[in-house]
Image (cartoon, rainbow, N blue to C red):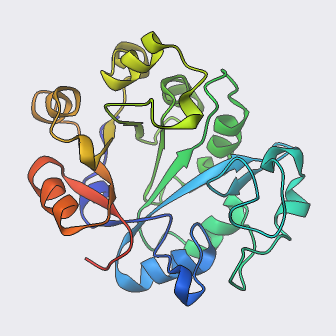
Amino acid sequence: MRAEPWLTARPIAHRGLHDLAGGVIENSISAAQAAIAGGFAIECDVQLSADEEALVFHDFTLDRLTGETGRVDARKAAELSGIGLTGSGDKIPTLTGFLAAIGGKTPLVIEIKSRFDGDLRLAKRTAEIVAGRKDRPIVLKSFDPVVVAALRELAPGFARGIVAMSAYDAYRDYDPLSAAQKHALANLLHFGESQPDFVSWKVADLPTAAPFLCRKALGLPLMTWTVRTQEDRARAAEHADQMVFEGFRP
């Protein structure tokens, strides 16, 4: 399906409008509420718990953002949702709780995290949760084209996006992938299978052929991440339809 115009109508706060110094932590309900108050859309990440619930959290481990250690998927949802986010009064939210707090007040872009191992449990659970909210401005995206392709059947009625960049070697998460796989990701060679409705590309890598052609030849909306500087902002304005930003207020 075609992505709705609201997807790129306003700047998208990366993991919510977070402010570490102010005690507002990324992917928290407080960060979401701050984005709503500022008139911004929201991007958030989801991870899977041991009992296959979707939690709003970016990292695969708890170490960076909480006082706990270890893998997120080693803990059950009830335990995870009781863990505080360091430096704030917030706890890790479930996706269900996060959506309830937002209440459809602003567009939401949900990024489904993946280890590129063919595991679709998180995609399935996310699709189940959003299924009853087709009246709300929600889209789904992932770096993993297998996930994006699966969402066509798992979440009909929701636009699906691919997140990508031009070089993957600098990121540890992609170390298990072969050079050929990285090349395919960087050039959207999976396009026939994934058939995304929109594209989200790393701002430092713009302009480049794959997202340019998606935007200009196919008419797919192009957002760009993560915009943090005036230089990034100028590049986003020239080469994309909207920015995913953090560290300032547009």
Q: Is residue 119 above or below residue 193?
A: below
Task: Give me the residue at 58% from left, 35% from top.
Answer: 173
- Residue 57 appears in which quarter of the rendering? bottom right
The reply to whether residue 186 is in sight is: yes
Task: Give me the residue at 19% from left, 42% from top.
Answer: 206
Q: Is residue 28 above or below residue 156?
A: below
- Between 19 and 48, the residue placed more toward the observer is 19
- Residue 83 appears in which quarter of the rendering? bottom right
- Between 72 and 63, the residue placed more toward the observer is 63
Residue 110, horizontal then vertical, whole percent: 52, 52
- Between 222 and 61, the residue placed more toward the observer is 61
With 124 as the anchor, is 179 left or right in this view?
left
The residue positioned farthest toward the top in the image shown: 180
Task: Give me the residue at 65% from left, 45% from top.
Answer: 126
The residue positioned farthest toward the front in the image shown: 170
Residue 205, horizontal then vertical, whole percent: 24, 40
Quadrant location of the N terminus?
top left
- Figure label count: 0
Q: Is residue 134 above or below residue 94?
A: above
Quadrant location of the C terminus?
bottom left
Residue 151, horizontal then vertical, whole percent: 54, 31
With 22 as the anchor, is 126 left or right in this view?
right
With 43 as the anchor, is 4 left or right in this view?
left
Q: Is residue 193 above or below residue 239?
A: above
Residue 65, horizontal then vertical, whole percent: 69, 66
The reply to whether residue 222 is in sight is: no
Task: Give me the residue at 60% from left, 41% from top.
Answer: 113
